[in-house]
Image (spheres, helix red, strand yellow):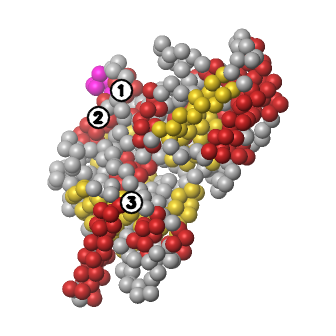
């Protein structure tokens, strides 16, 4: 979006606010402003289909437009009832029955029923590009139907009545309510402009999204904002200015924090996420030529040579392992040291085993999104791998084309930051389950899959034990190169905005937000 246009929009919005001050009584103007909120976010057109997007910024946006059976508690992100009001589980843990909220309606006034939920989930399973669809594979017949090998009638999702939905599982799934908080499992309408959440999208134009309160929403009386406006800008200096002058109440995108006048507004928090490199496997792809990097013997040599300190330099939270550390999760031995001599021995042995000449240069093609990894880090990796006879070739793409192209790319190594979508280690390990729609790596391991299955059938303590064992198998296979756990930066003054709480997902359900007070005009503000 044109920078001048963004500036004009925000200035006009500011003038509009000032005109309210000039034309209304003190009581009315305060109440008027309390009913609206302006959020400044990074420049990127939202994917408004909750079933196809994987972007964190979309997940935040969609908390306003859609709900499923459960939604997130705004503080601890535990599941809370939404379209469901109750559920029960059978004695064998394989049949779940949900009671649907009788007051749930779409934004067009159409009633939400158990049939609406079933139709939404069946559409999810029918969508080839739906990245989270495989999380429903625990339901009987879902995986076969999703892969075109079974009928819709064989899927164990049943609407017993308008207000009762049952699902029949292949095996126990104690984590299910946490998964169902995710926007992918929202209730959707056949009309994509109709919402099931607390707001509906009234307008979108040139990077400005306007949400209005859904008058039919089941919990509308506890939704205090009448309007939320999202404005997109990547200008760090101007964004700080817009916050300081009261145009926006929350910046979730780029900003120069040194120019924020009130330091209390800077919210810096660890994120339930891991940045990492991963190898892509071609063993499971028919007709695809294998490379040496399909074999752990070669990958292990690179891991020994890896310049871990340089890779994680400057990180707030270096990550020696893949799964974000949760309370109660066992300690897993990660990658922390470099042994270049051992790396040379491992490479020599691998070449001998697979009859690769010792003097043959082996290419390692690394595909990245632009500016996602510093030149210093890339050069350190190249220098570390060169003594092994490995030439690292870096291909850089735009962010959007990079993410969309990973599944069809023939490169060897990729870099990614993954934000867990529910508060469980499975949110990370699901990326490497052999049947998962999230498995861009193409890696398969039967023992790893079996441990994930066992974890779904036991107590929480036992569950974490099995999941930690699965992570150890993943790390021992030299598929994932963990770098760090990212941090989130938000600019929001909690003395002015209520319902916003710091959490590891950096997800802040929009229905809970409200204005506590109106920022006054500051006559002596240094604007830039």
Q: Which mark is residue 410?
A: none
Q: Which mark is residue 146?
A: 1
Gap between marks 2 and 3 measured at Cα: 34 Å
Name above or below for residue 390 compared with residue 491. above
**Residue range of the region highlighted in magenta in the rendering:** 151-158
Residue located farthest toward the right when viewing the structure as drawn: 341
Q: Which mark is residue 123?
A: 2
Q: Which residue is mark 3?
A: 233
Q: Position of residue 56 (x, y in %)?
A: 44, 49
Q: Position of residue 426 (x, y in %)?
A: 54, 40
First reached walking from the N terminus: tag 1 or tag 2: 2
The residue located at (55%, 70%) in the rendering is 258
In-image side of 42 versus 219 (left or right): right
Label 3 SS: loop
Residue toward you, 185 or 293: 293
Q: Are marks 3 and 1 in contact (CB under 8 Å)?
A: no
Q: Position of residue 361 (x, y in %)?
A: 68, 21
């Amino acid at each position: 979006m044109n920078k001048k246009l963004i500036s004009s929009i925000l200035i006009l919005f500011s003038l509009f606010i000032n005109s309210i001050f000039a034309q209304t009584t003190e009581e009315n103007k305060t109440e008027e402003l309390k009913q609206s909120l302006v959020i400044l976010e990074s420049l990127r057109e939202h994917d408004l289909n909750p079933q196809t997007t994987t972007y964190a910024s979309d997940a935040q946006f969609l908390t306003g437009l859609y709900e499923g059976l459960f939604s997130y508690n705004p503080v601890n992100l535990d599941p809370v009832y939404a379209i469901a009001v109750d559920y029960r589980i059978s004695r064998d843990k394989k049949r779940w029955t949900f009671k649907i909220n009788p007051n749930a309606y779409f934004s067009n006034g159409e009633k939400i029923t158990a049939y609406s939920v079933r139709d939404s989930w069946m559409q999810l399973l029918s969508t080839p590009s739906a990245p989270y669809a495989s999380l429903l594979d625990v339901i009987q017949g879902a995986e076969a139907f999703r892969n075109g090998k079974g009928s819709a009638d064989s899927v164990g999702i049943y609407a017993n009545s308008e207000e009762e939905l049952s699902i029949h599982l292949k095996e126990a799934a104690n984590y299910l309510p946490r998964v169902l908080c995710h926007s992918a499992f929202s209730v959707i309408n056949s009309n994509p402009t109709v919402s099931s959440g607390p707001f509906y999208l009234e307008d979108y134009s040139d990077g400005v999204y306007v949400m209005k309160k859904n008058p039919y929403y089941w919990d509308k009386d506890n939704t205090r904002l009448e309007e939320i406006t999202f404005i997109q800008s990547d200008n760090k200096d101007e964004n700080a200015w817009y916050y300081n002058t009261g145009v926006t109440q929350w910046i979730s995108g780029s900003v120069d924090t040194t120019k924020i006048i009130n330091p209390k507004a800077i919210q810096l928090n660890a994120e339930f996420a891991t940045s990492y490199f991963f190898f892509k496997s071609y063993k499971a792809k028919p007709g695809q030529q294998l490379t040496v990097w399909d074999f752990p013997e070669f990958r292990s040599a690179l891991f020994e040579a890896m310049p871990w300190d340089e890779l994680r330099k400057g990180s707030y939270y270096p990550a020696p392992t893949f799964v974000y550390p949760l309370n109660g999760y066992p300690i897993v031995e990660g990658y922390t040291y470099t042994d270049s001599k051992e790396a040379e021995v491992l490479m020599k042995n691998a070449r001998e085993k697979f009859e690769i000449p010792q003097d043959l240069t082996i290419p390692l093609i690394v595909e990245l999104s632009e500016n996602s990894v510093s030149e210093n880090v890339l050069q350190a990796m190249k220098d570390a791998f060169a003594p092994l006879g490995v030439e690292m070739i870096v291909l850089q793409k735009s962010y959007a084309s990079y993410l969309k192209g990973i599944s069809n790319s023939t490169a060897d190594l990729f870099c990614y930051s993954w934000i867990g979508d529910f508060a469980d280690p499975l949110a990370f390990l699901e990326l490497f389950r052999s049947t998962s729609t999230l498995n861009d790596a193409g890696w398969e391991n039967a023992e790893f899959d079996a441990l994930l299955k066992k974890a779904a059938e036991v107590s929480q303590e036992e569950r974490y034990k099995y999941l930690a064992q699965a992570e150890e198998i993943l790390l021992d296979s030299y598929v994932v190169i963990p770098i760090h756990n990212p941090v989130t930066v938000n600019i929001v003054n909690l003395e002015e905005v209520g319902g916003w709480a710091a959490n590891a997902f950096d997800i802040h359900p929009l229905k809970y937000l409200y204005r506590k007070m109106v920022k006054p005009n500051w006559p002596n503000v240094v604007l830039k």
